[in-house]
Image (cartoon, rainbow, N blue to C red):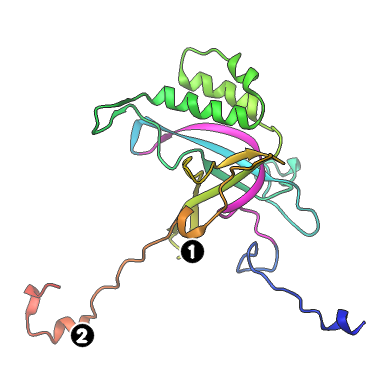
Amino acid sequence: MNEIKNKKVMLNTKDMSAGSGRTKPVLDPGNHVVKINSITLDQTPYDSEAYNINLHVETAPLGGEFEGFFRDYNDQSQGRYEGQIGRVRISPFPFKDTTLPSGREISRDQEILKNMITLAETLDMRDGLDSIEADTIESFMTECNNLFGGSKLINMCIGGREWENKEGYINNDLYLPRISKDGIAMEGLDKENSRLLKFDRAVHVKALVKKEPAADASFKANSGSGDDFEL
C-alpha cells in the first residue's frame, strides 16, 4: 500500500492548451496515428500555377472529457470531431512546373501523381487509384478525395513551421517531412521493419525566429548622431 501511495504521478503538458487542462482539439507536430477525412488541392495565394495538397486528418477517438471542434460550425447538429484534427500538407513545398539549376524539368502534375501513389500504397488502395482517369489534375484530385476520404488509420510523422498570429500565439503550419535515408513520413499500422521517421522537433520543425526589438529610443536620442545614425 505504501508503494502505491508513494508512487510519483508524472505530469505532462504535451496535449494541453494554456487556457484549460483539457486536451487540445488540434494536432501539434509529432508522431500520430490518424485517418484522412478529406484531401484538397489548394492554389497558393501567391502563384495561381502552384498547388498544395492538404490532408485533413483526424486522430482515433480520444473519449473521456475530450471535446473536439464542431464538424460544421454553421450546422452544429453534425456534432464534433471525436479526435484531434489538423490540416497537413503532403509536402513542405508547393507543386509547380519548374526547371532546376541542373536543367532537370519538374512536372507539377507528375509530382502530384507520384505523391498520390505513395499515399495509395500506404493505405493499400493502389488498385483504386489506378482506376482513376481524369482530364485535369483538379479533376483527378477530386476523385482522389472520393477514394481516400474516410480511409483507415495510418502512422504519420508530422513536422511543420512555427508562425505567430496577431495575438502573439505560436501556431504550426503542418506538413509531412520529405522522404530521406532516415525514413518515411507515413506508413501503415503494425508494419514489420518499420521505416517511419521518429519525430525530432529540432529536425522536423522550423522554429519561429523572433525579430530583434528596435533599438531603444533613448539610445538613439543620446547617440549624438541625430537622424543619420544607423546600426
Q: Residue at x 43, y 27 (%)?
A: 111
State the extent of the magenta-drawn residues as a range. Answer: 23-45
Q: Residues within 10 Å of mark 1 (few under 14, many from 20)?
A: few
Q: Residue 24: x, y in percent?
A: 65, 59
Q: Residue 225: x, y in percent?
A: 6, 80
Q: Residue 38: x, y in percent?
A: 61, 33
Q: Amino acid at mark 2?
A: Ser
* Residue 180 sits above or below residue 138 on the image: below
Q: Quadrant of residue 92?
A: top left
Q: Residue at x 62, y 39 (%)?
A: 187
* Residue 118 sits above or below residue 56 on the image: above
List the residue tagged with mark 2: 218
The image shows a total of numbered marks equal to: 2
Q: Quadrant of the C terminus?
A: bottom left
List the residue tagged with mark 1: 169
Q: Residues within 10 Å of mark 2 (few under 14, many from 20)?
A: few
